[in-house]
Image (spheres, coloured by chain):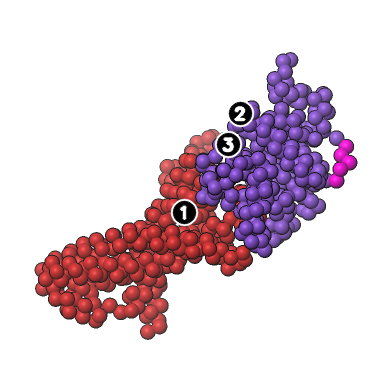
């Protein structure tokens, strides 16, 4: 896809090995993620989707290659710069990763408590209330512990926490894994709504759910064996001539050959 | 001819050589882990003194490690004092030296038993909890979540625990000392009919402040030891529920073994230090 939009995340020649170069999970990946769009990264299991996401977040160091996020190369950043960059990124983890010793409201307040000490407790709580409301969680659940919530509710709290600092980039790691079809659709709508309500924000969704990719994606990236196999619009993806893409579409959309 | 010679050489390593190789690998691996733990300790202490302040978390940990261990320390301390004084009384009675029961019990408790037993008990209680909590946070991606929110997980999770254990342990050890020696006195005076004045007088004569200090210093290092080993085990846990179990087991067992080993070395270092000062 010829992308005219400015680039939020630029990855060049990214390689990652966890066994000192004996084998590579990412094998020289080149990828540009445009600003202001929802990019869905799909692929079969074990193709390096989550490893790629962890590189974007700076949780893994590349074996080779470079990653530029919002114009800055991650490799050359010191601790303070990494922290400053991470404040501009929000992440919704696969299982929400809520802090289990905090209530829902405390979870949603946590990033504000850490990074906005200038705000009073009341102001922080008001902001967290607002984010939880945007995420569609009823106030009756705000004082509950994460263990008392359903899977869908946890995702909503995770999203409210990810949105707390109004990030420029939102990353979703398999947001609908393990959810029933109705909840899956609800989470997809939530991602869509959240993206549209945060003007100029960039969303990256890692998923293997093709239905979700078509529902929410402006840009679809398919990975295979540690490399980008395809990048384009949902329509381009449907009409792609690549054999593996066709197979993925057939299986993913439940289409008979 | 040369080929025949080569064919006759047995290239399979001997049983002994294989065992030596395995031991070498084991030693190398454990030295690497030890080095990693030392860097982890250095980082956690450095980060405790950098902003943002983790003082509220430190107080919370002090309460968890210190306050919540008091009851178990009182219980074990009192029974240790009772058992030790009874055994020493029975032995000293044979040689008519029962007036030395007090100082012998006191020296044993203040210098060795209090710091070691406090260390072992608190390592099992608080160290196990630390490894399990951090391990669960690791496998459920909570530590990753902290990191991506721009919060240093070592500073947030490890530093307050390590510093709190270092501060809380001497206090717990002092409580152990106090309850153990009073339990010993109650048994010796009220049940074994020793003279209370002689009991305390002999303790005053033989027990020097430095003996008390030695125990307290040792316990502070034991606190540092179990906190860093347990948090390190939990922090790098992997592999779901089984991984958390393994990390907890590793944290507690290694902490306890290291307390016994460190006890020997720290005792000698302190003894050498005091003799140099003298």
**Residue A208 position within the rendered picture, expressed as x and y whole percent measured from the top left:** 68, 31
Q: CB of mark 1 within 8 Å of CB of mark 3?
A: no
Helix or strand or loop: what does disc 2 sit on? loop
Residue B109's place in the image compared with A241, above or below, is below
Q: Residues within 10 Å of mark 1 (few under 14, many from 20)?
A: many
Residue with the most extreme top position: A257
Residue at mark 1 shares a chain with residue at mark 3? no
Answer whether residue A120 is visible to the viewer in this image: yes
Instruction: Indicate left or right for B42 with B276 as reference.
Output: right
Residue B85's place in the image compared with A104, above or below, is below
Residue B107's place in the image compared with A100, above or below, is below
Tell me the shade of chain B. Answer: red
Residue at mark 1 shares a chain with residue at mark 2? no
Q: Is residue A4 magenta?
A: yes
**Residue A132 position within the rendered picture, expressed as x and y whole percent measured from the top left:** 64, 45
Q: Residue at x 30, y 79 (%)?
A: B208
Q: Is residue B62 magenta?
A: no
Image: magenta residue range: A2-6
- In the rendered image, the quadrant that contains the C terminus of chain A is top right
| Nearest the eye: A6 or B253 | A6
Tell me the shade of chain A. Answer: purple
| Nearest the eye: A84 or B8 | A84
Helix or strand or loop: what does disc 3 sit on? helix
Q: Which mark is residue B130?
A: 1
Answer whether residue A224 is visible to the viewer in this image: no
Q: Residue at x 72, y 45 (%)?
A: A170
Main SS, magenta residues? loop
**Residue B53 position within the rendered picture, expressed as x and y whole percent measured from the top left:** 58, 65
Q: Which residue is mark 3?
A: A151
Chain letter for the residue marked with disc 2 in the picture: A
Chain letter for the residue marked with disc 3 in the picture: A
Q: Which mark is residue A180?
A: 2
């Amino acid at each position: 896809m010829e992308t005219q939009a400015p680039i939020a995340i630029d990855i060049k020649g990214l390689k990652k090995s966890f066994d000192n170069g004996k084998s590579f999970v990412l094998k020289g990946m080149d990828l540009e993620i445009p600003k202001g769009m929802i990019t869905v990264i799909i692929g079969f299991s074990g193709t390096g989707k989550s490893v790629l996401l962890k590189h974007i977040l700076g949780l893994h160091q590349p074996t080779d290659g470079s990653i530029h996020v919002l114009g800055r190369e991650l490799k050359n950043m010191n601790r303070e710069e990494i922290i400053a960059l991470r404040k501009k990124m929000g992440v919704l983890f696969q299982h929400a990763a809520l802090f289990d010793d905090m209530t829902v409201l405390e979870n949603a307040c946590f990033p504000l408590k850490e990074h906005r000490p200038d705000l009073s407790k009341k102001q922080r709580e008001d902001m967290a209330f607002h984010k939880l409301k945007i995420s569609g969680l009823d106030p009756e659940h705000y004082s509950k512990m994460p263990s008392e919530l359903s899977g869908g509710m946890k995702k909503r709290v995770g999203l409210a926490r990810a949105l707390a600092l109004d990030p420029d980039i939102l990353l979703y790691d398999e947001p609908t894994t393990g959810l029933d079809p109705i909840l899956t659709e609800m989470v997809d709508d939530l991602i869509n709504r959240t993206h549209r309500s945060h003007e100029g924000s960039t969303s990256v969704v890692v998923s293997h759910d093709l239905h979700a990719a078509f529902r929410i994606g402006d840009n679809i990236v398919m990975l295979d064996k540690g490399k980008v196999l395809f990048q384009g619009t949902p329509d381009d993806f449907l009409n792609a001539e690549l054999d593996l893409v066709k197979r993925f579409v057939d299986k993913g959309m439940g289409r008979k050959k | 001819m040369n080929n025949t010679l080569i064919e006759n050489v047995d290239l399979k390593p001997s049983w002994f050589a294989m065992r030596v190789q395995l031991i070498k690998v084991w030693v190398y691996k454990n030295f690497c882990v030890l080095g990693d733990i030392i860097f982890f300790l250095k980082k956690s202490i450095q980060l405790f003194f950098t902003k943002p302040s983790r003082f509220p978390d430190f107080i919370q940990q002090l309460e968890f490690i210190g306050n919540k261990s008091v009851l178990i320390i009182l219980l074990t301390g009192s029974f240790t004092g009772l058992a030790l004084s009874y055994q020493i009384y029975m032995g000293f009675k044979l040689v008519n030296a029962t007036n030395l029961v007090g100082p012998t019990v006191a020296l044993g408790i203040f210098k060795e038993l209090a710091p070691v037993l406090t260390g072992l008990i608190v390592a099992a209680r608080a160290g196990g909890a630390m490894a399990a909590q951090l391990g669960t946070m690791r496998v459920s991606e909570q530590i990753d979540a902290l990191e991506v929110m721009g919060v240093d997980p070592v500073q947030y999770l490890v530093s307050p625990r390590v510093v709190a254990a270092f501060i809380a342990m001497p206090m717990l050890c002092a409580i152990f000392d106090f309850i153990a020696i009073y339990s010993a006195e109650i048994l010796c005076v009220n049940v074994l009919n020793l003279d209370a004045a002689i009991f305390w007088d002999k303790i005053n004569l033989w027990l020097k402040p430095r003996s008390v200090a030695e125990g307290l210093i040792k316990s502070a290092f034991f606190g540092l030891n179990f906190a860093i080993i347990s948090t390190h085990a939990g922090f790098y846990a992997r592999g779901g529920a089984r991984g958390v179990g393994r990390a907890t087991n590793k944290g507690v067992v290694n902490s306890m073994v290291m307390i016994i080993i460190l006890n020997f070395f720290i005792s000698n270092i302190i003894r050498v230090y005091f003799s140099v000062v003298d």
